[in-house]
Image (cartoon, rainbow, N blue to C red):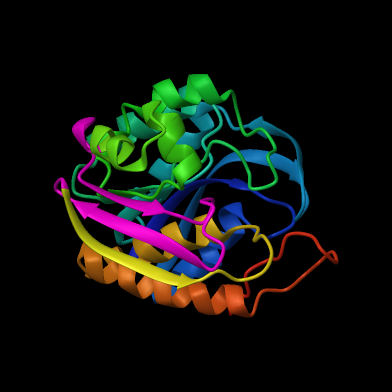
Amino acid sequence: MRPTVLCFSGLDPSGGAGLQADIEAIGQSGAHAAIACTALTIQNSQQVFGFEATSSQLLLAQANAVVNDLPIQCVKSGMLGTTENIQALADFLKSHPEYQYVLDPVLVANSGGSLGDQATLVHAFQQLIPLATIITPNTIELRALTGLDDLELATQKLLSMGAHAVLVKGGHEATADYIRNALYINGELISETTCARLDGEYHGSGCSLASYIAGRLALGDNIQQAVNHAETWLFATLKNAESPVVGGQKIPKRF
């Protein structure tokens, strides 16, 4: 069977982000996706209205049910929602040090909707950072996790908190014509990539990128290879993205 990525993420009814984005992206990477649902959300492609988190006991029961059933090579997390779920994931990862782990530190949706109390989540995320093979924050999340505005200083602080590798996503920065991503491994800047800034906003782009990286890691890529493959694939999905609402957020076309 194909190598498997076990995803800890929330269910998005619109199918743009969350678990559906994980499943589609991992499938496109060539790996298989298994699911541990962290929350049921109330949202569409444009806005988050609320959520109800899964209990940590149920979350771990979902994950443990597939551990001995599927060839898990990597874990990916997105929305976790509560400190209890973050702690549960940390305990799970510590009991399975053989798994690679992609941490997408989701704090808010692109629409700005709450996915949990940000200050509480930021503090709790600190225990996941040293466990991650790679962390994929956008610049808003990077600043929130570190409390620093300067991106270089914030990245170095995140690395000093135990991060092995960090992919800083620049889509939220005020660069009119391009987006710059920067990959750091073991404290060093390994690569910088730029792509043209496409028109509009996208629902589920961060989930998709992190999940594709996880899929490629599961298949045997090293970190830099996985990131390069994921960035190339994501840009194609965004160029072909679909618009549910005129002028609203677009959904990446992952197939």
| Quarter of the figure with the C terminus | bottom right
Camera sees residue 7? yes
Q: Is residue 15 left or right of residue 175?
A: right
| Quarter of the figure with the N terminus | bottom left
Q: Is residue 224 left or right of residue 143?
A: left
Q: Is residue 165 magenta?
A: yes
Judge whether 241 appears above or below 104 on screen. below
Using the image as rendered, state which of residue 87 and residue 35 is in the foreground: 87
Judge whether 188 appears above or below 240 on screen. above
User: Residue at position x 66%, y 74% from top?
Assistant: 241
Residue 22 at x, y percent in the picture: 52, 60
Residue 213 at x, y percent in the picture: 36, 63
**Snapshot quadrant of residue 4:** bottom left
Segment colored magenta: 159-187
User: Residue at position x 68%, y 50% from top?
Assistant: 12
Q: Is residue 102 magenta?
A: no
- Residue found at the very far right of the displayed protein: 246
